[in-house]
Image (tube, grey):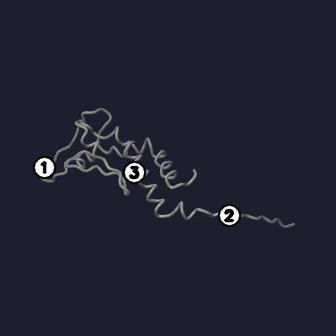
Amino acid sequence: MGTSVSVKIDLKGIENKVSPTALAKGKLAIANQMLTDMSPFVPRKSGDLSGSGQATKDGVRYPGPYARAQFYGSSYNKARVFYFKKYTTPGTGKRWDLKATALHLKDWERVGIKAMGVKA
């Protein structure tokens, strides 16, 4: 009265899909999508900050003399403390990453998986 079950697992190609190269490709694809999706939330008085964003293998970077201060909403110079209370463009402000994450996290996951070559 025993039951026999036979299972065959085909791991052909799995090494390529989880290789360091595939992971790096997925991370870069996610960073590029993040850069695009965060753009509407980045403060833009003249457009210099929103246009300076760069997608890297480790994430998104906004270089510039005031990017950190705009991101956190306060001074980047310890000698002089100030806070940003008003942003010129409606819908923009500090911590634009959190606003974009709330709206686009699932999209970023799909982009990364697709870039790695894994079927979702």
Viewed as shown, does residue 69 lie left or right of 107? left
* Labelled disc at residue 31: 3
State how far apart marks 2 and 1 are (Cα): 63 Å
Viewer-proximal residue, 27 or 74? 27
| Residue at 58% over, 62% down | 14
Q: Which amino acid does label 2 sit on?
A: Ile
Q: Residues within 10 Å of mark 3 (few under 14, many from 20)?
A: many
Q: Mark 1 points at which residue?
A: 80
Residue 103, compared with residue 109, is above or below; it is above
Q: Which of marks 2 and 1 is in front?
A: 2
| Residue at 46% over, 47% down | 108
Q: What residue type is labelled 3?
A: Ala
| Residue at 44% over, 43% down | 104
Q: Mark 2 points at which residue?
A: 9
Location of residue 109 in the rendering, given as x and y in whole percent from the top left corner: 49, 50
Report the quarter where the N terminus lies: bottom right
